[in-house]
Image (spheres, grey):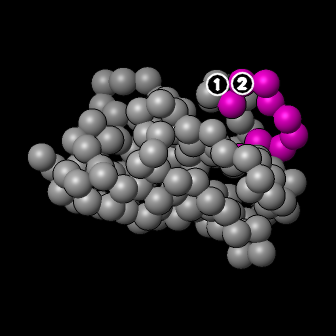
Amino acid sequence: QVQLVESGGRLVQAGGSLRLSCSCSGLTLVEYRMGWFRQAPGKEREFVAYITTRGASTVYADSVKGRFTISRDNARSMVYLQMNSLRPEDTAMYYCAAVRGYINDHTNENRWNFWGQGTQVTVSS
């Protein structure tokens, strides 16, 4: 049974930093592309970041480019999202996602196979 468990979310002041973690079990992580999405209250879930199986390639939403960094440690079955220069508009529930094989639209949540339960990030102004 595949499980993705996010952690690291909390209340932080604007300008601060957080590192989210996603612990992955029940799958061979190197076979999966990984991503982070987020959902703010009253809004649809949106793509944040994506990383290929061995970390050779990453893609970011324009809203986080230059501030967030996605990374992975396949040996430890972990995926991370380093978030710097946080803004109040980054406030959301953050979700880790996994997909096996190539997908032509990583921003489309329907393309992803597995999801975590989310971790809440709140950025105060």
Q: Which range of residues does the magenta coloring cover? A: 98-106
Q: Is residue 50 left or right of residue 120?
A: right
Seen in the picture, residue 101 relative to 25 is either above or below; the reply is above
Seen in the picture, residue 121 relative to 107 is either above or below; the reply is below
Q: Name the element at disc 2.
A: loop
| Quadrant the N terminus occupies | bottom right
Measuring 66% from the left and 45% from the top, which residue is drawn there? 58
Q: Is residue 91 left or right of residue 64?
A: left
Q: Name the element at disc 1.
A: loop
- Amino acid marked by disc 1: Asn
Number of the label disc, if any, that sits on residue 108: 1
Picture coordinates of residue 111, whole percent (x, y): 73, 28
Measuring 30% from the left and 52% from the top, which residue is drawn there? 85
Query: Which circle, 2 or 1, is nearer the viewer?
Result: 2
Q: Residues within 10 Å of mark 2 (few under 14, many from 20)?
A: few
Closest to the observer, 110 or 89 = 89
Q: Does residue 58 belong to the magenta stretch?
A: no
Measuring 69% from the left and 31% from the top, which residue is drawn there? 106
Closest to the observer, 6 or 84 = 84
Q: Is residue 30 left or right of residue 64?
A: right
Q: Looking at the image, which residue sits at the far bottom? A: 76
- Amino acid marked by disc 2: Asp
Per the picture, the main secondary structure of the magenta-coloured stretch is loop
Residue of label 2: 105
Measuring 80% from the left and 58% from the top, which residue is drawn there? 54
Seen in the picture, residue 69 relative to 76 is either above or below; the reply is above
Closest to the observer, 84 or 41 = 84
- Label 2 close to label 1 by CB (< 8 Å): yes
Task: Give the quarter of the image for residue 75.
Answer: bottom right
